[in-house]
Amino acid sequence: MDMRVNIAGLELSNPVMTASGTFGYGVEFKRYGQLEKLGGMVVKGLSLEPRAGNPMPRIADAPAGMLNAIGLQNIGARNFVEKRLKLLPWGETAVVANLYACSASEFADLAAYLSEQEGIAALEVNISCPNVSSGGVLFGQDPSMAAAVTRAVKDRSGEMPVIVKLTPNVTDIASMAKAVVDAGADAVSLINTLSAMSVDARTRKPRLANVIGGLSGPAIKPVALRCVWQVAQAVDVPIIGMGGITSAEDVLEFILVGATAVQVGTANFIRPDFAFRLVDELAALVDELGIESWDDYRGSLQV
Ligand SMILES: Cc1cc2nc3c(=O)[nH]c(=O)nc-3n(C[C@H](O)[C@H](O)[C@H](O)COP(=O)(O)O)c2cc1C
């Protein structure tokens, strides 16, 4: 079968991408497989200036998953472009920049800079930063703030596809999706981590220095499937699904509920060669199940 998929003009050789924050800047994973094999990779969230992130410990185990409160540590957009981007095979696999900022105008400046860089195929906008002037509400939890960020990014990104990444930490994810699509998002990706905490009964301490963190991994897959399904009913743009993918069957589940492509996150920490293997496993499973085209299979869940 032709494994290619198209996300708002962005052509991927197959639907397997890697998720932001779990695949470094891509370069670190070169020794585990051929980056060219992946449909695409989303690099660690980039801010205008480098960020040190939160104090340690910022990772904790959870049943069937993990918690993190990295705090968006990154080398900054300029360092990424000047030092890492040129080391990636961007002619053969889509390199997506994940953007993180704490005001709409900072998002816009970041989008303007990154969208001009040869080698970046699309922007993924992480709207999980709290807007301090609005009392700490996350951009992604308020439809009008999410729409304002989306518009600001779209205004300054030229022709580059803009993917808005949604948080599951809302009452109604479908209305968030509608708000960003109405504001111009070319695609949406979901889900980001679930707000969570882990505590130790003996030491009486939280396991993360930040106390609260984000839950990811297989534990969140049912939530992610539900979110993708609801968003697929609500909007008409391509959806990139993620949350707990650890097998080719998981990938098909996301496509069945409406995703066009997927991202692999926590599984990269468990097996750094996982995403590369997944590309082959997915092709084999598609053959085994006799799936003839993504267009036929996508969203074909029978309810
Ligand atoms: C350690 C870690 C760091 C992450 N950093 C980012 C980030 O910088 N930007 C972002 O949009 N998502 C980030 N995420 C969220 C993932 O991209 C993904 O949405 C989430 O982990 C769900 O997928 P999974 O269950 O396959 O891990 C991070 C996740 C983890 C575990």
Image (tube, rainbow, N blue to C red):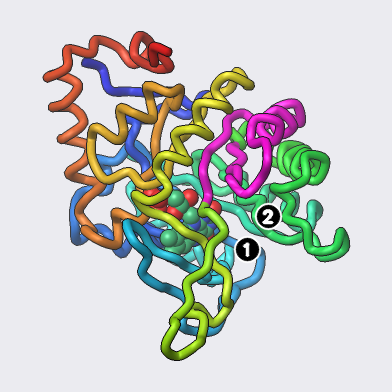
Quick check: 36 above or below 249?
A: below
Relative to 212, 67 lies left or right = left
Query: Mark 1: few, some, or many residues within 10 Å (few <14, many ≥20)?
Result: many
Whether residue 164 appears in magenta in the rendering, the answer is yes
Vertical comparison of 2 with 25: above or below: above
| 186 inside magenta stretch | yes
Tell me if I can see residue 13 in this picture.
no
Q: Residue at x 19, y 21 (%)?
A: 286
Q: Are marks 2 and 1 in contact (CB under 8 Å)?
A: yes
- Mark 2, residue position: 110
Tag 2: amino acid: Leu
User: Quick one: label 2 or label 1, which is nearer the N terminus?
Assistant: 1
* Residue at (63, 58) in percent of width and height: 100
Q: Which range is magenta?
A: 163-192
Instruction: Indicate the position of residue 230 as horizontal and vertical percent values.
Output: 56, 26
Spatial distance from mark 2 to mark 1, Cα to Cα?
Answer: 7 Å
- The residue depicted at 24 percent of the width and 32 percent of the height is 249
Residue wearing tag 1: 47
Badge 1 element: loop
Q: Is residue 170 left or right of residue 83?
A: right
Q: Residue at x 53, y 54 (%)?
A: 194
Residue 24 relative to residue 128: left or right = left
The C terminus, quarter of image: top left
- Residue 240 to residue 44: above or below: above
Say if residue 101 shows up in the picture.
yes
Image coordinates of residue 266 in percent, x first then y, are 35, 56
| Mark 2 residue element | helix
